[in-house]
């Protein structure tokens, strides 16, 4: 059947735009189906069909998702939240066995992305400029003496999403206090420069980066890019191509980069659609279409840098309203 | 001329929905015009016409706004940010002299809303249940001894918007430290209960509250209501009616309320469109239409409680993109 290219988006939350973009691309080809553990996830109501499912850490979650995939002839599945990326990556075979392709990197790559110190070590080993990082207090004090690092610095959990629990620190005493109170902390150099975000698609078949969209972040809000402007830079395109190839990413990823004194420093990677992806899409960078191409068996052409510079993106709040009755229909529209 | 009912929204920022709602109501009757000091305010681009103006605290700001009103035959002006409410209220006559009606309460009422301790005193004097508050440290320690108040408490600036700089405090030492470091602090009882928001319209001609929409807040994000559900309660409608009449509010206001052990406590008032107003509008509570009625010389009917209960509102991010060229046209579309 030609209209059987169904795609499942897990933990859709408030990412309405992502669901809308897939729905548009799938029109006439298949359905976009969404899940969330809460009926108050507005993106559910953008999908052709939705399911309210258990929380990811509840027993039977994986079986529930697999059965949704089977029952709905899901061709590809992706998640919009970090913890679920490991679940998809680790259970790739179970999905492939029922004909569903998880759009995700390999488990080791996902794990490396979520451990900021592992990612730091990887970048140092491979000669990519990055943000100087320490997990060893003594090493940090030593470098402080020699002038290899200076205050202010950031102290953050080695594993942790967005800007949760990040402290800007200006003295040795504060460092000592934080390290005595919490485990698994990391000290990171404060980067005094512009922040960039890159939305990168690495073709699932050719394993080559085929699309890179770069934006300078102009304003953040609640840990997300609120305003940004599209930029192009061949030097940064090349750095990103080399980095994602070496690190073995696949599918859609989001990279945070600093620019200090005209040099680029890769900061971290979210191996999924980033919160700022709508900027790329609205500039014509159609990643949903690339995913659909891949799961239809087609390799994507290289379109790196095929967008306009100087396009500004500004977010604002849109609202969905739904009546009590609709929410209580048991998770199925 | 019949299509001459032009309305100006100042400091529109990211409040795209408010501009959209006015534009819809004004269709065929007049234009909606918006201003902001930044070309990256996405709500500008929803308006029929926009101006990028100086910052509110820059010299000549008032003259600039008055001249926009005059040149564009503005019938009514309103602002979406707190500091500007005082400016509109204090210069009401200058606007009225050129035929523009500021949709705002009187200066004393605005001032009372922005000074949380003044508002507290007003509520105590008028027997409205409210959140126990202290500006006097000694008085607080005394009440702590007698058991009239207990930890945790909130410490916040007497004047201050949203949840900026609010600390939850659990010890006398922390209170002492905060009071020694900062001026103009207030200690507030911690309310362990549900939070409600009320969008209230007090008719500018009859000076009677004619519309009250109540929502229970289910989730906050960056100081704003992110998810809420509409509720109705005659007891709360009556409390709000009495309160806004006694406090002499006019136009559109937003009230924060706590419910603890089945009793309501008025917490604070924003004498402007609140960030959660789209919930009210999407439930049929059409305040832009009420404002248009008033500035056309018509008194609004009482529609208090004329909406459905159990309607859920969920926010998500929408995006606007604009090219560099459009932003640099000098503030005029």
Image (cartoon, coloured by chain):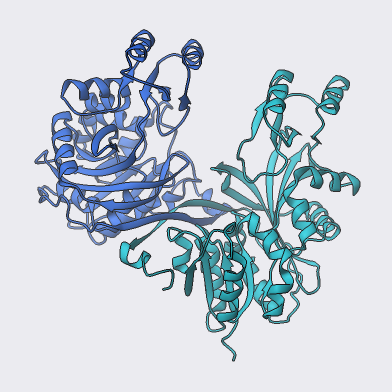
Chain colours: A cyan, B blue
Give the total of numbered labels. Answer: 0
**Left or right: A59 as drawn, with respect to A116:** left
Q: Is residue A2 left or right of residue A122?
A: left
Q: Is residue A294 visible?
A: no
Q: Quadrant of the rendered structure where residue A285 is? A: bottom right
Residue at the (88%, 44%) spot, across then down: A124
Give the residue drawn at x 22%, y 43%.
B200
Work out whether B324 lies above or below B134: below
In this rendering, does residue A179 appear at all? Answer: yes
Q: Residue furthest bottom?
A: A1
* x and y percentages locating residue B216 in the rendered image: 32, 47
In terms of image quadrants, where is residue B307? bottom left
**Horizontal arrangement in the rendering, residue A133 relative to residue B219 (left or right):** right
Q: Nearer the viewer, residue B182 or A95?
A: A95
Residue farthest front in this picture: A59
Image quarter of the N terminus of chain B: bottom left
Q: Is residue A161 left or right of residue B299?
A: right
In the image, residue A263 sits, relative to residue A321, either above or below, namely above
Q: Nearer the viewer, residue A291 or B34?
A: A291
> Residue at the spot x=50%, y=62% of the render?
A16
- Tell me: residue B250, above or below residue A206: above
Give the percent coordinates (x, y) of residue A111. Answer: 76, 53
Residue at the image point whose x is 70% and y is 57% from the top: A271
């Amino acid at each position: 059947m030609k209209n059987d290219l169904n795609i499942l988006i897990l933990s859709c939350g408030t990412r309405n735009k992502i669901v809308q973009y897939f729905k548009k691309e799938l029109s006439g080809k298949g359905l976009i189906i969404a899940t969330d553990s809460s009926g108050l996830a507005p993106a559910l109501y953008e999908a052709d069909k939705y399911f309210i499912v258990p929380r990811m850490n509840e027993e039977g979650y994986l079986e529930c998702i697999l059965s949704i995939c089977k029952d709905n002839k899901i061709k590809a599945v992706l998640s919009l939240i970090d913890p679920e990326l490991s679940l998809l990556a680790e259970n790739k075979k179970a999905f492939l066995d029922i004909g569903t392709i998880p759009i995700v990197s390999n488990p080791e790559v996902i794990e490396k992305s979520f451990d900021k110190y592992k990612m730091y070590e990887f970048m140092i080993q491979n000669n990519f400029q990055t943000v100087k990082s320490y997990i060893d207090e003594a090493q940090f004090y030593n470098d402080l003496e020699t002038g290899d690092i200076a205050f202010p610095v950031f102290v953050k959990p080695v594993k942790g999403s967005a800007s949760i629990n990040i402290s800007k620190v200006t003295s040795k005493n504060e460092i000592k206090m934080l390290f005595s109170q919490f485990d698994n902390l990391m000290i990171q150099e404060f980067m005094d420069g512009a922040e960039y975000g890159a939305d990168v698609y690495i073709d699932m078949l050719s394993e080559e980066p085929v699309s890179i969209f770069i934006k300078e972040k102009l304003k953040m809000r609640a840990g997300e890019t609120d305003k940004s402007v599209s930029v192009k830079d061949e030097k940064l395109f090349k750095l990103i191509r080399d980095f994602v190839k070496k690190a073995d990413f696949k599918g859609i990823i989001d990279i945070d980069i600093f620019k200090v004194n005209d040099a680029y420093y890769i900061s971290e990677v979210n191996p999924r659609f980033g919160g700022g992806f709508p900027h790329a899409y609205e500039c014509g960078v159609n990643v949903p279409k690339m995913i659909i191409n891949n799961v239809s068996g087609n390799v994507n052409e290289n379109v790196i840098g095929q967008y306009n510079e100087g396009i500004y993106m500004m977010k604002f709040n849109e609202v969905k309203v739904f009546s009590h009755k609709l929410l209580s229909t048991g998770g199925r529209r």
